[in-house]
Amino acid sequence: MRGEPDDLAPTMAEVAGAVAAVGDHNRAEQIARTIAYPQEQARALIAVAGAVAEAGDHEWAAGLAADAEQIARTITEPWQQGYAVIAIAGAAAAAGDHEQAEQIARTFADPDYQAQALAGVAKAVAKAGDHERAAGLAADAEQIARTITDSQERGYGSAEIAVAGALAAAGDHDRAEQIAHTVPNPHGQAEALADVAQAVAKAGDHEWAEEIARTVPNPHGQAQALAGVARAVAEAGDHEQAEQIVRTLTDPYDQVGALAGVAGAAAQAGDHERAARLAAEAEQIARTLTNPYEQMGALTGVARAVAAAGDHDRAEQIARTHTTPQEQAWALIEVAQVVGLPQAGHLLGTAFALGLWRTPLQALATLYPREAIRIADAVYANDGSARLLEERPQVTGPEHPHTLQARARIAYKTGTAGDPAGAAAIQEELLVACLRVLGPDHPDTLTTMGVLAHWRDEAGDHSGAATAWKRLLTARVRALGPDHPDSITTWDQLASSRAKAGDAEGAAAATAELAAGLMRLLGPDHPHTLSVRGHLAYYQGMAGDANAAALAFTQLLEDCLRVLGPDHPDTGAARESAVYWQAIAHEGAS
């Protein structure tokens, strides 16, 4: 349901940051402090601190950052607390309190987190102009990163990625490039080299930046790095060279994104003729993409570029070609943020009508801060959902969409209060009403089916959850098609519930469909595709077919070695599983 507050706290954290960005710092802080979830309240206070610091009140910003740190320390999930504190250290540095930021970063016992935190502080210090201190912090982060012994942390190389970015920000581009090349994970290495290449491009050495980007071994990663360099070159005013870089890309999806990025930079510089030409070319290429997931993302970028080039009506038309309401809402919001007032008003209004009600809130806060504040007040004033449910039928009727939203809120609060079975019961009644009032293919009806399945799983009714996921899958395939990302995701949820219910054979069948869909959407070498193939092999083994599991893990190992390299954690897991299931198959044959 649109009123489902499952991610309300993250949304309100974004609203707090947006309200702060437009200058109402007091109200932004008030909104942030009403958020109940520690990680989101900390994130909101960090965003407000950043806006306050930019406005010049560093003392207030430092106080907000200190409060955010205290709240973050209460987060019980270690990785969530770690990344929250890393962000707070960066916020304190951005607020100008470099000493406090460094102290926060050095409180980590885990060398991976400490290296990332120090690197984040180094980047903020470099942005403030103190490159000497930034270089020292980055060097410390590099030394600490070398002490990491955890194989999984070393396997991805998050610390090295952060260190490379910090060294690049501090101006030590040579060392940054060297560190980036040491990242063991191909995707992480691509990310690090892309960051370094963009920093070098922004520093004015466009040829070197392009050379660095072309050293990325992964084809898609290299394309993304070159697209980033092209944008930086275009933003520096050399639109001709930026366009030349883009035209070396051969993959249509990568080229669309890069063309749209250069078009946006050209429009910002006033070269609207070039921007319009590049945006039109990007749209033509996007229309040729056969992968629906890629086409949706590409067309959203094109719509934004066309809007930046000045053709606001055409941008809206492109945004409205999205076939799913939520994707159309996101595209309209992107266009609204470019065109500004007054046209943005009607675009945001349409987005509110199409998608989840909270989707346009951040854009609304930027363009209409008073309205965003009014909505925030209304949301947090309504903490008596039971009373609201009692009042709504008298005003709107028991099956009015607003009443249905209130019932969804009751279900959510019931579940999060520790009664998932009660939440499932409410959702079952709500689903009957949605089917009758909205119809079987309405987005809110589909969402209600998914929420019902979730609460059944939480209540331990995994067979019932699997039944609900199967029903949702049938509806999504009918409404959206078998290759829509939402349809493919539902195969994953169905497999999970079947596995929890002890139906390994059913889980394998659902996972096989999921793997086939991901092969079509993402390709055989995408990390998510490889991961799901591992799940499929495992379920095949648990269903009693050890030979199939052994063969599947052996084939997966070959692909992981080729795509991820021998030292990646996923490669190691595939190797161990292949050995295990080969042994089981051998025992069964003897």
Image (cartoon, rainbow, N blue to C red):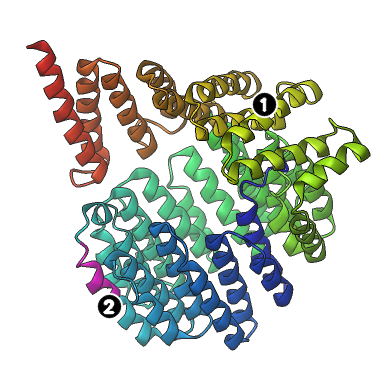
Instruction: Bin the neighbour count of mark 1 within 10 Å (Cα to Cα): few under 14, some 14-19, many 20 and up.
Output: some
Q: Residue at x 77, y 25 (%)?
A: 433
Of 63 and 478, nearer the camera is 63
Query: Which residue sits at x=62%, y=72%?
Result: 48
Determine which residue is flagged by label 1. Answer: 428
Q: Quadrant of residue 81?
A: bottom left
Q: Predominant secondary structure in magenta?
A: helix
Q: Is residue 345 above or below residue 405?
A: below
Numbered disc 1: secondary structure: helix
Give, as a single range, the part of the protein colored magenta: 139-148
The picture places residue 354, in percent across and down from the top left corner, at: 75, 39
Give the answer, above or below, for where 526 lies relative to 550.
below
Is there any visible trace of residue 323 in the rendered image? no
Q: Name above or below for residue 53 compared with residue 437.
A: below
Q: Residue at x 42, y 23 (%)?
A: 501
Q: Dot 2: within a 10 Å radius of its alpha carbon, few (fewer than 14), some, or many (20 or more) residues?
A: some
Which of 375/123 is in front?
375
The amino acid type, in three-letter code, at marker 2 is Asp
Amino acid at the residue labelled 1: Glu
Q: Is residue 336 visible?
A: yes
Q: Position of residue 250 (x, y in %)?
A: 43, 40
- Look at the numbered disc 2 and give the secondary structure of its residue: helix
Residue occupied by mark 2: 140
| Residue 518, quarter of the rendered image | top left
